[in-house]
Image: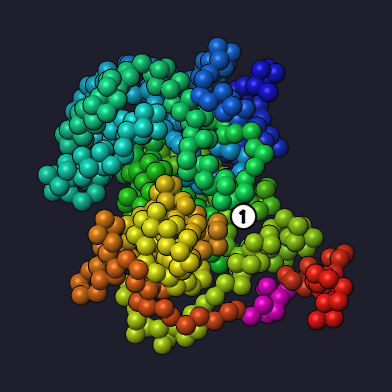
Amino acid sequence: MAASIDKWVYRFGNGSADGCAKDKAFLGGKGANLAEMAKLGLPVPPGFTVRAEASELKGKLTDAMRKEIEEAIAHVEKGMGRKFGATSKEASALLLSVRSGAAISMPGMMDTVLNLGLNDALVDQIISDAEGDEGTARWVLDNYRRLLQMFGDVVRNVDMALFEAELSRVKEVAGVHSDVELKSEHLREVVEAYKGIYGRETGSPFPQDPWEQLYEAVAAVFASWNNSRAVRYRQINEITGLLGTAVNVMAMVYGNRDDDSGTGVLFTRNPSTGEDMLFGEYLFNAQGEDVVSGSRSPRPIAELEARSPELYAELLATVKRLEKHFLDVQDCEFTIESGRLFMLQTRNGKRTGPAAVRIATDMVREGLVTKEDAVARLVTPQHLDQALHARLKDPAASEASLIASGTAASPGAASGRAAFTAGEAEAMTEKGMAVLLVREETSPEDIGGMHAAKGVLTARGGMTSHAAVVARSWGKPCVAGAGSLRVDASAGTAVVHGTSTVLRRGDWITIDGSTGKVYLGQQPMAAPEAGSGELGEFLSWVHAIRRMKVKANADTPDRKST
């Protein structure tokens, strides 16, 4: 198939795009929607998408692809007024991000590399041009250490834990708890340590040629289509027939530029309950991975309105316009650079069963969609199954067993035996046990254990963390960011801080993803009522629209009466 393709690269930005939302099959959901947002005139950084069919080449880019990529880079340079590979002043240096994006959303399963184009010479030049400005020095060194870590992990398979351990060591020596508290001198130490780790683990120094960085990153992201977690996710979700992942290359905008910069993830409606309000989180002085990884505690998106009313109003108008355009709840990623809003992604939001039903009934009442469209497109059979999830039979009676609280990240209640690694969860489930996966925070590598478990509990993270997003997409209860838990996976324990309570591997535990509460033991459950409220209303539409009735199911004629 790849040999017959004449055009590999599709540009977007500056109010125009080569593709559109209908091109999802080969541009992927992310690339197609970036093109659509650009055509709508929304603030999208310029960039381009390389077709998904290149995945079958397993990361080997042809000369024709490289030529089109180089031409597209010139388009991005013109749109940003910056030069890729420049080593003069900060304003002229273009950095790039490389992200995956298949036709069907697979949150966190494939790879991303940010800040491509930085090297020793450019970092030193930017710091020199800043003439001692601590903010600029800190910013560029923070970007460089992120590039070293992500490039090492994604492109050269260096263990992320090695980088994280070094960062933790520097923070401990500096006497700080958060990355943003590190000064430029500390970040310089981190950068030098990261370069040492990269060299030792790969046998070669970090590449200083920006074009070499770019081509290696693009090839690696294409190859991530076949990494173990992506393959496992497709198996679990029965995703077949896709061309692969497209690769999106975009001009970097900086959520970590200064204290007026930030990044966030939001849904246009609550994906847990369906309530018509913005639902999400943001961080100032951060890049996107900081929000979803759980490495820092993000703030609720509602707080942005108090901090910056005009910016919040612009964001609200933008994402609601996207919801009206796509006629579905949108899951959006945004960055603010020095007070200026940029949209980095939009896609139809994954939601729980109860949320899907409420969203469908609300959108019909609002006149956005018809009943027929709501039944056909907004609620799936899986959503209806999730809407019938269990809940605590008597929450007041369970209060005596309450041990911790966190974010109500995905609704429903579940009981199971505690497992502290994904492997444990899968093994225990295979033995017929009901399991809850308990982690400090989840990562894409935990996907098998998350699927096996009845629910997920994490000590870190929030409403848009990896654990929360994946659990909601599968309709599994989740409590995220139960900060009083001290999880030690190697020991198979979770200690409740400030108490003598210790949860051990195999102990029964119950979580309520609707309230964020965590209980010891197996708490009594009750089923919801199927014929009332919004669910009953939605099912009445289904009954009126359907053309076929199923009266009974019998294996043989003689059993039809039974």
- 42 with respect to 406 (left or right): right
**Three-letter amino acid code of the residue under disc 1:** Val
Residue position marked by numbered label 1 in the rendering: 329
Residue 536 part of the magenta-drawn span:
yes
Percent x, y for residue 107? 51, 47
The residue under the point 25% across, 71% down is: 502
Q: Is residue 163 visible?
A: yes
The magenta-colored residue range is: 529-537
Q: Nearer the viewer, residue 334 or 392?
A: 392
Q: Is residue 21 above or below residue 130?
A: below
Identify the secondary structure beneath mark 1: loop
Side of 259 where 181 appears, left or right: left
- The residue closer to the viewer here, 330 or 194, is 194
Which residue is nearer to you in this view: 138 or 109? 109
- Please identify the quarter of the rendering in which residue 433 is found: bottom left
> Which quadrant is the N terminus positioned in?
top right
Q: How many marks?
A: 1
Q: Quadrant of residue 186?
A: top left
Q: Residue at x 51, y 68 (%)?
A: 411
Q: Left or right? Give the position of 423 relative to 390.
A: left
> Would you place residue 462 above or below residue 143 in this image?
below
The answer to which image quadrant residue 199 occupies is: top left
Taking the spot 39% from the left edge, 43% from the top edge, the residue there is 289
Horizontally, residue 523 falls left or right of residue 189, namely right
Indicate yes or no whether the magenta region holds residue 115: no
